[in-house]
Image (tube, helix red, strand yellow):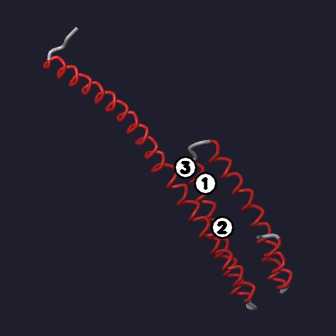
């Protein structure tokens, strides 16, 4: 069967249109998947990272306050620093509650949160020992607790 030049051109154009349609459909599905991933990123991942970054900053503030307590001899100063530590712990707890209520997208997120809570509980227990020793004037033992128990 011999095709005329017009028929061959029409077949080529039809094949090209069909190929472009297939590429367009695949592209739409790819864009839809990308859009869903970006929505997840914006709704959960970035806020989660920012929340954990804020928690880390608050923990660093606690460590600074604890170190300042080691250098303090005045009971009033130590009391103020303990109060600041408690306020910071409350802010951390609020951030974790926010994470739990708003940012858990999958079970892995809950596992991360539970691990963090366990580690914070251990840290807070060591911090309590630390502050008790500081109040007693046992700075060397407090330093030992801060290095060996609080990390």
Mark number for residue 97? 1
What separation in Å lies between label 1 and label 2 (alpha carbons)? 12 Å
Left or right: 6, with 78 as reference point: left
Q: Secondary structure at mark 1?
A: helix
Residue 79 location (% of width, % of height):
71, 82
Q: Secondary structure at mark 2?
A: helix
Q: Residue furthest bottom?
A: 73
Expressed as whole percent of the image width and height from the top left, the position of residue 104 reads 58, 46
Q: Which residue is mark 3?
A: 103
Corner quadrant of residue 118 = bottom right
Q: Position of residue 115 (x, y in %)?
A: 71, 54
* Label located before the other in sequence (2 or 3): 2
Q: How many marks?
A: 3
| Residue 89: mark in rendering | 2
N-terminal of the pair, mark 3 or mark 1, is 1
Q: Quadrant of the C terminus?
A: bottom right
Q: Residues within 10 Å of mark 3 (few under 14, many from 20)?
A: some
Residues at marks 2 and 3, CA–CA distance in whole angstroms = 20 Å
The residue drawn where x is 50% and y is 55% is 46
Q: Secondary structure at mark 3?
A: helix
């Amino acid at each position: 069967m011999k095709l005329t030049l017009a028929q061959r051109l029409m077949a080529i154009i039809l094949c090209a249109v069909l190929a472009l349609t297939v590429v367009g459909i695949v592209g739409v599905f790819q864009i839809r998947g990308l859009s869903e991933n970006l929505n997840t990123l914006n709704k959960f991942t970035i806020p989660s990272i920012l929340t954990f970054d804020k928690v880390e900053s608050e923990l660093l503030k606690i460590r600074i306050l604890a170190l300042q307590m080691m250098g303090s001899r005045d009971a009033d100063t130590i009391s103020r620093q303990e109060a600041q530590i408690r306020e910071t712990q409350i802010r951390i707890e609020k951030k974790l509650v926010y994470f739990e209520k708003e940012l858990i997208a999958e079970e892995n997120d809950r596992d991360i949160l539970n691990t963090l809570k366990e580690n914070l509980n251990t840290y807070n227990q060591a911090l309590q020992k630390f502050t008790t020793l500081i109040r007693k004037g046992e700075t060397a033992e407090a330093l030992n607790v801060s290095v060996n128990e609080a990390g």
